[in-house]
Image (cartoon, rainbow, N blue to C red):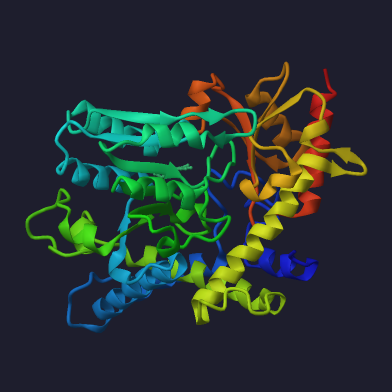
């Protein structure tokens, strides 16, 4: 989907796409843990620190500029998610802190009889806040929909059966950070709406891989983290206007009484917003680069929003090719599917790559995950990671240590080939 020229142009925008700070030429495949920074985002962050480090609320230029940068950042997130207004965008320290923030606010509404429905492949960020409500007696239980480990998908019948008139929150990862599976978000949203439940989406793992449209999904809340999409540490949460108005989050008395300030704990960092605006400008640029391939597609959206949708669609198409290469390999090297001693977790059907993101967790029989990751680095200069990725599914299936690779827009087919060759050498070594 991306031609060679475009991939080169994209890679040129990431100062560490090719080499790390030591000058090592390496393939960076640890994107699920945190992506590399976009040059323009780092620059915008730097410039905001220098030019408008004053706090907002003052009458002087630096302070006004800081406010402007924050507003532009919120608008950029709203454009990206197709949220109705920048006031529906809350920022926070991390996705974890934002989920706790909202869960505590929702807990104030509950009586102890309610349940929350999640899935077996949630990240613990989308488990512990709801379990905490149970521990405090605010809800009766958290229910988890089974995941079919054969293909890594949610058992939708089981999920539907768990939802009843006492379900007040249905909360789902848009994509599993362990299995790489994408959740059927629209279908699940309809199940939640049938019983009048809140619909909460953890889009932290999905955000860099494809389109998210909160109005199309009709979700009540959606959270994602900027460091998973080329920016700095910190996160954003979208909330429906009416909920943000009525919920009562924990807040200090003098903080604003309206969203977004009502939900934001402490003083904002304008440099964080500046960096994220630059990421959205970058995605818009990709949209412009590929829009000639799109004819009238996405014409219901206009201007920047259409370009962002085009960009995310093109990114998804491109990543499907990377996924296929990871699984199938090429003439000179087998893919993960045919690699001796390798077990891949999650969906491996080449016909169904649309249902997954290019995140692959696997084991090599007889070699620990730590050793595989170390040798991939030492012998192949592939930055992969082994360990526990805070996924509930890993505990349920007793996979405490797996190796995970996760690819994004700056990764190439050559890098995939190099990774497979190194892995093959490791698999054949004893
Ligand atoms: C699916 C998912 N949800 C939540 C998180 C936690 O995000 P944060 O570090 O911003 O709290 C992660 C981090 O890896 C994740 O992959």
Q: Where in the figure is residue 338, as x and y percent of width and height?
A: 83, 31
Seen in the picture, residue 154 relative to 78 is either above or below; the reply is above
Note whether residue 92 is visible.
Answer: yes
Of the 4 image quadrants, the one containing the N terminus is: bottom right
Seen in the picture, residue 191 relative to 303 is either above or below; the reply is above
Of the 4 image quadrants, the one containing the C terminus is: top right
Asked where in the image residue 403 lies, by quadrant, the reply is top right
Pick the residue in front: 367 or 127. 127
Q: Tell whether 61 sits left or right of 136.
A: right
Pick the residue in front: 369 or 210. 210
Q: Where in the figure is residue 308, as x and y percent of width and height?
A: 54, 71
Give the number of callouts: 0
The residue at 32%/72% (across/down) is: 85
Q: Where in the figure is residue 255, as x and y percent of width and height?
A: 13, 60
The residue at 66%/20% (across/down) is: 368
Quadrant of ligand 1: it is top left
Seen in the picture, residue 60 relative to 183 is either above or below; the reply is below
Note whether residue 25 is visible.
Answer: no
- Looking at the image, which residue sits at the far right? 331
Q: Where in the figure is residue 82, as x and y percent of width and height?
A: 43, 68
Asked where in the image residue 285 lies, by quadrant, the reply is bottom right
Pick the residue in front: 14 or 90. 90
- Looking at the image, which residue sits at the far left? 253
Q: Tell whether 174 sits left or right of 351.
A: left
The residue at 73%/51% (across/down) is: 322
């Amino acid at each position: 989907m991306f031609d060679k020229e475009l991939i080169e142009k994209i890679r040129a925008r990431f100062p560490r796409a090719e080499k790390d700070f030591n000058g090592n030429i390496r393939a960076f495949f640890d994107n699920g843990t945190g992506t590399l920074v976009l040059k323009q985002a780092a620059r915008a962050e730097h410039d905001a620190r220098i030019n408008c480090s004053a706090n907002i609320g003052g009458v002087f230029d630096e302070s006004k500029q800081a406010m402007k940068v924050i507003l532009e950042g919120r608008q950029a997130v709203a454009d990206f998610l197709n949220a109705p207004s920048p006031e529906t965008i809350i920022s926070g320290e991390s996705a974890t802190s934002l989920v706790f923030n909202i869960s505590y606010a929702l807990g104030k509404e509950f009586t102890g009889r309610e349940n929350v429905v999640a899935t077996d492949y949630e990240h613990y960020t989308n488990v512990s806040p709801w379990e905490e409500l149970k521990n405090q007696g605010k809800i009766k239980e958290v229910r988890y929909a089974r995941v079919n480990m054969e293909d890594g998908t949610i058992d939708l019948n089981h999920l539907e059966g768990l939802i009843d008139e006492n379900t007040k929150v249905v909360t789902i990862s848009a994509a599993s950070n362990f299995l790489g599976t994408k959740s059927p978000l629209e279908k699940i949203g309809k199940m939640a709406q049938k019983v009048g439940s809140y619909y909460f989406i953890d889009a932290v793992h999905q955000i860099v891989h494809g389109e998210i449209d909160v109005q199309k999904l009709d979700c009540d809340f959606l959270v994602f983290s900027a460091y998973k999409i080329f920016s700095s540490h910190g996160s954003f949460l979208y909330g429906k206007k009416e909920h943000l108005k009525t919920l009562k989050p924990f807040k200090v008395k003098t903080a604003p009484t309206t969203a977004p300030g009502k939900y934001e704990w402490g003083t904002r960092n304008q440099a964080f917003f500046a960096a994220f605006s630059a990421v959205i400008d970058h995605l818009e640029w990709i949209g412009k680069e590929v829009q000639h391939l799109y004819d009238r597609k996405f014409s219901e959206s206009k201007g920047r929003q259409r370009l962002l949708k085009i960009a995310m669609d093109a990114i998804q198409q491109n990543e499907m090719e990377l996924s296929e290469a990871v699984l199938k390999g090429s003439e000179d090297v087998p893919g993960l599917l045919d690699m001796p001693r390798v077990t891949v977790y999650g969906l491996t059907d080449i016909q169904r790559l649309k249902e997954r993101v290019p995140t692959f967790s696997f084991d090599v029989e007889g070699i620990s995950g730590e050793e595989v990751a170390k040798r991939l680095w030492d012998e192949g200069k592939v930055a992969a990671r082994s360990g526990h990725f805070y996924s509930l599914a890993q505990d349920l299936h007793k996979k405490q240590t797996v190796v995970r690779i996760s690819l994004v827009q700056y990764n190439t087919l050559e890098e995939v080939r190099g990774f497979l060759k190194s892995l093959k050498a490791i698999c054949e070594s004893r």
